[in-house]
Amino acid sequence: MSGATIQIDLSALSPDRQVDELKRQYLSLRGKGAVVRACVGALPVRQYVSMLERGYRVYIEPAGGGYDLILLPDGSTPRLGLRGAHSIACHPDGCVYTNTTENRVAVIDGVLYVNDSKATNVDAAAKALACYDDIYWIAGGRAKDGGLAGLEPFYPKIARAYLIGEAAEDFARQLRDAIPHVPCGTLDQAVEQAAADASLSQGPEPVVLLSPACASYDQFDNFAKRGDAFRELVMRLDGATSVTQQGKAA
């Protein structure tokens, strides 16, 4: 099977089932030198980000009016025609996902920590929330008009929210009983509490997600500084090993 390309058609499946099947194929073929080309139909941004964020080697390529996802289970170098395909994925809504593996901070005892500090409004936060389930969500800062309005469809994916910054009280009022939430005030308290809660999750892939849906200026100079602070706080947790240190199979 070495060097073989396995073609599968997943276009009839939902995005979540596509991801499940892609993961199964990826794991079953690791070490066999094969490449998987999966027909997924419409531009698979959600599936692509979900796979890439968790360390799977995956690429997008236009094919026959739709799109294929190409998996490289052995981390091999893609053919010339695929180079850079993973770097930019354009969605019809105008969003561009670039190099999303940089958002992955660490995996600690099965909990993934994701830095999406650049999500300074609800539209950006929605794209991050769409990629995960069993989310321990850190949100807040200096709110934009409307607060959290528009994120309601993602609430079932959120195990608990940890509210920080100026928006904490307003966000708590907006959330009410929709999802459990904790007023943390500061990022360090939010990381500590989210890490403790996520470590007790019974789900297969809990995620501590910093995707604030707010500007950072109430507590930080900019969103990059907020993200750096999150990364530093995560790396201080017991058992923390950076994703880059873990390598491609992390």
Image (cartoon, rainbow, N blue to C red):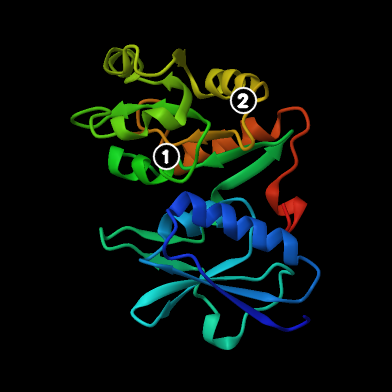
Decide which of 12, 234 is in the foreground and name it. Answer: 12
Q: Which residue is mark 1?
A: 129
- Quick check: 163 left or right of 167? right
Q: Which mark is residue 198?
A: 2
Kindly give the residue lying farthest to the left in the view shown. Answer: 145
Name the residue: 74% across, 62% down: 28
Do we see residue 248 in this rendering?
A: no
Where residue 83 sits in the image (x, y, percent)?
55, 80
Front one among 18 and 238: 18
Image quadrant of residue 214? top left
Task: For mark 2, give the secondary structure.
Answer: helix
Secondary structure of the residue carrying tag 1 is helix
Q: Is residue 227 above or below residue 51?
A: above
Give the vertical position of 173 relative to 59 (above or below). Answer: above
Farthest residue toward the front?
12
Number of the label disc, if any, that sits on residue 218: none
Label 1, label 2: how many angstroms apart (C-alpha)?
A: 16 Å
Q: Position of residue 126 (x, y in %)?
A: 35, 41
Which percent across, then down, holds residue 156? 40, 28
Q: Would you say 134 lies left or right of 122 here?
A: right
Q: Quadrant of residue 120?
A: top left
Instruction: Name the amino acid type tagged 1.
Output: Leu
What residue sits 45% from the left and 28% below the top? 158
Asked if residue 241 shows in the view, the reply is yes
Query: Would you say 65 lies left or right of 137 here?
Result: left
Q: Amino acid at mark 2?
A: Ala
Could you tell me residue 41's position as x and y percent?
Answer: 39, 68
Residue at (27% x, 60% y) in the render: 94
Q: Counting other residues with Cα less than 10 Å from the Cα at mark 1, is it few (<14), some (14-19), or many (20 or more)?
A: many
Neighbours of disc 2 within 10 Å: few (<14), some (14-19), many (20+) = many
- Establish if 132 lies above or below 234: below
Query: Which residue sits at x=18%, y=31%?
Result: 145
